[in-house]
Image (cartoon, rainbow, N blue to C red):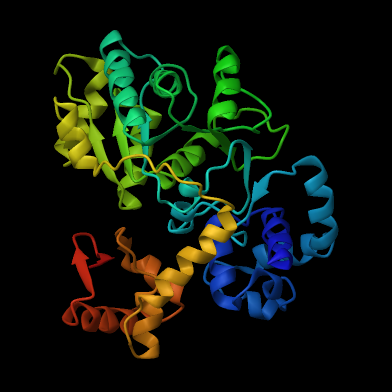
Amino acid sequence: MTEERAYWLAWAKISGIGPIALQKLKQQFDSLARAWTVTPAELGQISGFGRQKIEKIVQERSRINPEELLKEHIEKNPNFWTPADPDYPRLLQEIPTPPPVLYYRGIVDSQEILGITPTVAIVGTRESSEYGRRWTRKISTILAKSGFTIVSGLAAGIDTEAHRACLEAGGRTIAVFGNGVDMVYPRENKSLAEQVVKQGLAVSEYPAGTKPNSKHFPQRNRIIAGLSRAVLIMEAPKKSGALITADIANEFCRDVYVLPARLDDEKSHGCLQLINKGAEVIPITMDKLLEMLGAMPPLDIDVGDSSEQLSLFEEKEQTSMPDLEPMLANIFQHISSEPILLDLIIQKTGLSSGEVSSSLLQLELLGLVTQLPGMRYQKN
């Protein structure tokens, strides 16, 4: 596990190798440690790995010692996870582009890591109206008191209201940064960021010292969506980062809810577009919203070490596995109560699309899984 961690970090240092390429490498060679030693010819077997890319990999790979890089990195950034770590957030493991390195600052909650505590993203425009801020405060407060963790991006406007209301209600919140977790943007949210790390968690895929960059924020939005079971868009004009988050949430099979507003309110034209595309409207009554989100009471138990909890969780999953043929069992273990895309099942199992499709049909006939719209599957 420690060895693989070093190679996630090393591959992330190779220019032109992003989350999708990393998933291809891992799928092709079973581990990133093995991928580090393969020949250029073997790299050429991967779709999208052309001659120039391979030459760059070989050149840069020769200058990096993964074990030494890990030691040096820990000195500057001691708190980070890779997908090889047991504490890496489970919900992020399910998306097709998990961050190869996720830095964090604050209080780690193992129930959140395991995906047991329900997490909901609340995002919207920086130039929010009183209407948008008021409903954001109301909904964030209710959800926080009902045991939900609120995820947002610490931006001005709606994000700020969501984090602040959650903290004031005594809840937990996760702020996803578009810069290093040792920096705060916007600056006026410095005191809010300090409260977040005292009561919740700040995460980022960028190492310490990374300054804010407009190119980072669309990438940041996929982490907000990935960490959440549902995304609430409170207020968004036609051009808004919140709409990017909504689109990504749809790709990740997350539910998207939208706060309705006046037809002549330009700050909500993006929300109206989402409703026209089929997004759910946030209900007027909070009881109905909690019902829609599948509210559960906060867990008042001693969760202990998160890695231990993960082992217990996996053991429970294994003991409840029905007696299936090896291929069916392999596919079934990658399906949970949360919907998962067919392409992601193929990626996780390493099987062909034909093998996965026929096996899923057998699992459906056995009453073990259900196919949902959009080629998604979930465990019954």
The answer to whether residue 185 of the structure is visible from this angle is no
Percent coordinates x, y for residue 17 in the rendering: 62, 57
The answer to whether residue 241 of the structure is visible from this angle is yes
Q: Residue at x 37, y 82 (%)?
A: 329
Q: Nearer the viewer, residue 99 or 145?
A: 145
Q: Residue at x 75, y 75 (%)?
A: 37
Percent coordinates x, y for residue 64 in the rendering: 82, 59
Percent coordinates x, y for residue 33 in the rendering: 70, 71
Give the quarter of the image for residue 195: top right
Q: Nearer the viewer, residue 357 or 136?
A: 136
Quadrant holding the N terminus = bottom right
Percent coordinates x, y for residue 356 in the rendering: 33, 80
- In the picture as drawn, the residue positioned furthest to the top comes out as 130
Q: Residue at x 53, y 43 (%)?
A: 109
Q: Residue at x 42, y 41 (%)?
A: 300
From the viewer's perspective, tell me whether residue 117 is left or right of residue 29. Answer: left
